[in-house]
Image (cartoon, helix red, strand yellow):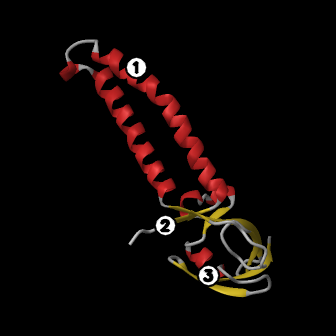
Amino acid sequence: MVYYQKMTPTGYQKIEEEIARLKKDRPRRIKILQEARSLGDLSENTEYTEAKRDLGHLQSRLRYLEKQLKYAEVIEKNDDGKVDLGKTVTLRFDDDEETEKYQIVGRMEADIAEGKISFDSPLGQAINKKEAGAVVNVAAPAGEYQVTILAVE
């Protein structure tokens, strides 16, 4: 069974851009490794060890990102009025009356500081497929809380 990673078109594009940036940087890192190798004894050559490690990290990151794209399921948002991947929701946290706005994104794109929550987070799962006006209980690791969906865009 193949597991597809759901993401927004923007998330897919960001991964493509990072892959392009890393591929562009790879020749420079290879040159640094070659120059470090020419410095002599490899057993005590810190520059060589660091350059080899850095190139290995770059190659590993490239493989990881390429696999993310290979198994990506890009979800286009629709206008059905329900919370779903790619949409922006305005929520009121009923315990403190605080209002927050979040974009619902794939797991790889989630960044709470940027107002992006994953569709499969406890909050994302609780509000998924609900409409504006719904009051939802969220079962989170720190305890349950309640939110009201004020708007779905």
The amino acid type, in three-letter code, at marker 1 is Lys
Residue in view at x 32 percent, y 21 percent: 47
Secondary structure type for disc 3: helix
Q: Is residue 59 left or right of residue 130?
A: left
Residue sticking out furthest to the top: 39
- Residue at the spot of label 2: 4
Nearest the eye: 111 or 32: 32
The amino acid type, in three-letter code, at marker 2 is Tyr
- Residue 145, given in percent of the width and then of the height, sits at 63, 82
Asked if labels 2 and 3 touch by Cβ distance under 8 angstroms, the answer is no
Secondary structure type for disc 2: loop
Where, by quadrant of the figure, is residue 138 drawn?
bottom right
Nearer the observer, disc 3 or disc 2? 2
Q: Is residue 38 left or right of residue 111?
A: left
Q: Quadrant of the C terminus?
A: bottom right
- Residue at the spot of label 3: 126
Of mark 3 and mark 1, the one earlier in the sequence is: 1
Crowding near the residue tagged with mark 1, few <14, some 14–19, many ≥20 C-alpha atoms within 10 Å: few
- Residue 46, given in percent of the width and then of the height, sits at 29, 22
Nearer the observer, disc 2 or disc 1? 2
